Image (spheres, rainbow, N blue to C red):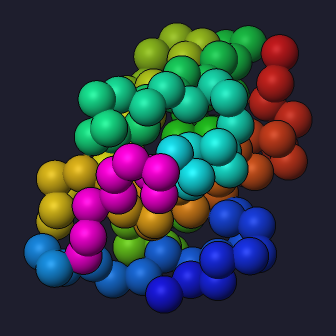
Amino acid sequence: MPNKTSPLHQQKCEPCSGDTPVLTGPQLQNFYERIADDWELVDEHHLHRVYKFDDFREALEFTYQIGEMSEQENHHPNIELTWGKVEVTIYTHAIDGLSENDFIWASKADTIFDQEKFKI
């Protein structure tokens, strides 16, 4: 499994199976506290975040970049692209809940957002 002490965005998503434990309680809260405050924890089942942009082109570019990262990590969110906005919902489909991979993915997406200076 990933290193528990290194920053989440520096870790790699690991393959999951139906045997991967769903994060709950204090363990879930510990991971949630390690990602940006902009993420919403919904029913202890998935993470949701809205990224805002100046225009459609920036939103599209961000969508492309997080899509590429998703392929590299082999962990795929639900993405909705609209003018000036990208909505992301992430959870581990194999376990129908949250795993460590979801928090790693969220941290990597935030790093892309921050590094590309998409913030408005």
Image quarter in which the C terminus is found: top right
Magenta-drawn stretch contains 18: no
- The spot of residue 48 in percent (x, y) is 43, 30
Q: In this picture, is 119 found above or below 10?
A: above
Q: In this picture, is 73 found above or below 63?
A: below
Of residues 60 and 18, the one nearer the viewer is 18
Q: In this picture, is 73 found above or below 59?
A: below
Residue in the image at 33% along x and 83% along y: 15
Which region of the structure is painted magenta? 20-28
Q: Residue furthest front?
A: 26
Q: On the rendered structure, is 83 left or right of 19?
A: right
Q: On the rendered structure, is 5 left or right of 51?
A: right
Residue in the image at 65% along x and 77% along y: 4
Of residues 119 and 92, the one nearer the viewer is 92
Residue in the image at 27% along x and 40% along y: 45
Q: On the rendered structure, is 70 left or right of 113?
A: left
- The spot of residue 108 in percent (x, y) is 65, 57
Residue in the image at 49% along x and 26% along y: 40
Quadrant location of residue 71? bottom left
Residue 12 visible somewhere in the drawing = yes
- The spot of residue 102 in percent (x, y) is 44, 56
